[in-house]
Image (cartoon, rainbow, N blue to C red):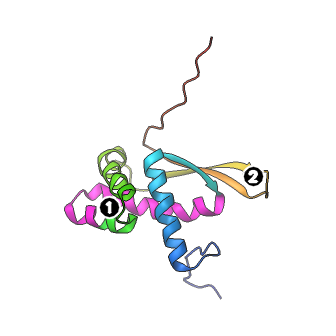
Amino acid sequence: MRHRSKTVKLQRDKAHREALMRNLAASLIEHKQIKTTLAKAKALRPFADKLVTLGKANTLHSRRRAISILGSNQLAQRSAKVLFEEIAPASADRAGGYTRIIRLGQRRSDSAPMALIEWVDACVPATEETED
């Protein structure tokens, strides 16, 4: 039986899975959207939503918790700053569901289902195409 076992293991051990979630969350915060497999996107969603909830509190304790969750490297420090200054204030009036998953179809090489995960409220920089 799988009662009360919510962890999506992604065929990795605990340390590898935690490092993967930290890196995916930092990339999502930095780039506002990332393209990854559907399983990883579904596993990242609650992780990222909990970080935004910490960001909405905007206290010293929540900042330190977010940095400890994201890791202690420079990318994590930058990501925590962006999280607290841009992403969390944009989602201040939202009660939950801060991320959106868009299915993209299958990857050509191994037919893995791909998805785009992005913030719902944060503005995503559009690619500018000029007509000549």
Q: Is residue 40 magenta?
A: yes
**Residue under numbered circle 2:** 107
Please state the extent of the stretch shown in magenta in the rendering.
38-64
Q: Is residue 48 visible?
A: yes
Q: Residues within 10 Å of mark 2 (few under 14, many from 20)?
A: few
Q: Residues within 10 Å of mark 1 (few under 14, many from 20)?
A: many
Task: Please state, as top left, top right, bottom left or bottom right, where the C terminus lies in the image.
Answer: top right
Label 1 residue SS = helix
Vertical relation: 131 (above or below) 71: above
At x 34%, y 52%, the residue is 78
At x 64%, y 63%, the residue is 39
Quadrant assignment, res 60: bottom left
At x 72%, y 56%, the residue is 113
Give, as a three-letter code, the residue at label 1.
Leu
Disc 2 or 1, which lies upstream in sequence? 1
Locate residue 24, reporting x and y percent: 51, 59
Locate residue 101, reporting x and y percent: 58, 51
The answer to whether marks 2 and 1 mark residues whose Cβ atoms lie closer than 8 Å is: no
